Amino acid sequence: MVDVRRARLADVPRMMPLLTGYAQRAEILLRTEDDVYRSIREWVVVETDYKIVGVGSLLIMWRDLAEIRSLVVSPAYQGCGFGRKMVELLLVEAKLLQLERVFALTRKPGFFLKAGFQLIRIERLPRKVRRDCVFCSIFNACDEVGVILSLKDVAIAGDVASSVAGNLNGSASQSFLPLNAF
């Protein structure tokens, strides 16, 4: 069974090897165990066979803007749609919070473009640059691409929103969200 859901405190030790592995390969910024515990409400996970095989978070940047970050799936499970499911869950949460826009910085823009995001210059995200980018070791040679999605035109069916709201509040989760929730 595959469970795409909000992360729990008990998940953190199982999330860390995945996060640390991607950070060591400089594919995401390092997240310490302390960081993850303190921000646990931002995280979603994919769990299968009692293993955490995917993680991602939604960081609120401002009243109208959030970032999807640290979105990773174990190499053995890539191509199964788990990344897309986490993005769907995070976007529904952003919509329920009445955010207007969600962005990501990525080396795989095609993944986000398929989900309806559009390219954006990183310089157009000054809060992100001031908060995180300037502290990155490759800031001056950054090879990430910015993508952004306006949530104003994203409609969420009532049953999807209530199901996801239940999922985000920790009740029984669906195995998968409807494919055309957006």
Image: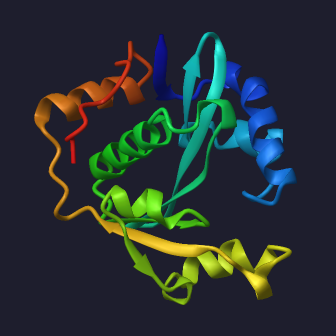
Q: Residue at x 34, y 55 (%)?
A: 115
Q: Is residue 59 left or right of residue 111?
A: right
- Among the 4 quarters of the image, the one containing residue 110: bottom left
Q: Is residue 147 above or below residue 30?
A: below
Side (left or right) of 66 relative to 54: left
Q: Nearer the viewer, residue 111 or 87?
A: 111
The mark total stands at: 0
The colouring scheme, among rainbow, by chain, secondary structure or one colour, is: rainbow
Q: Nearer the viewer, residue 117 or 134?
A: 117
Would you say 122 lies left or right of 88 here? right
Residue shown at the point (45%, 71%) measured from the top left: 147
Location of residue 4 with respect to 146 vertically, above or below = above
Percent x, y for residue 25? 83, 55
The quarter of the picture where residue 175 lies is top left
Percent of width and height locating residue 140: 78, 88
Instruction: Tell me what residue is drawn at x 72 percent, y 31 percent.
Output: 15
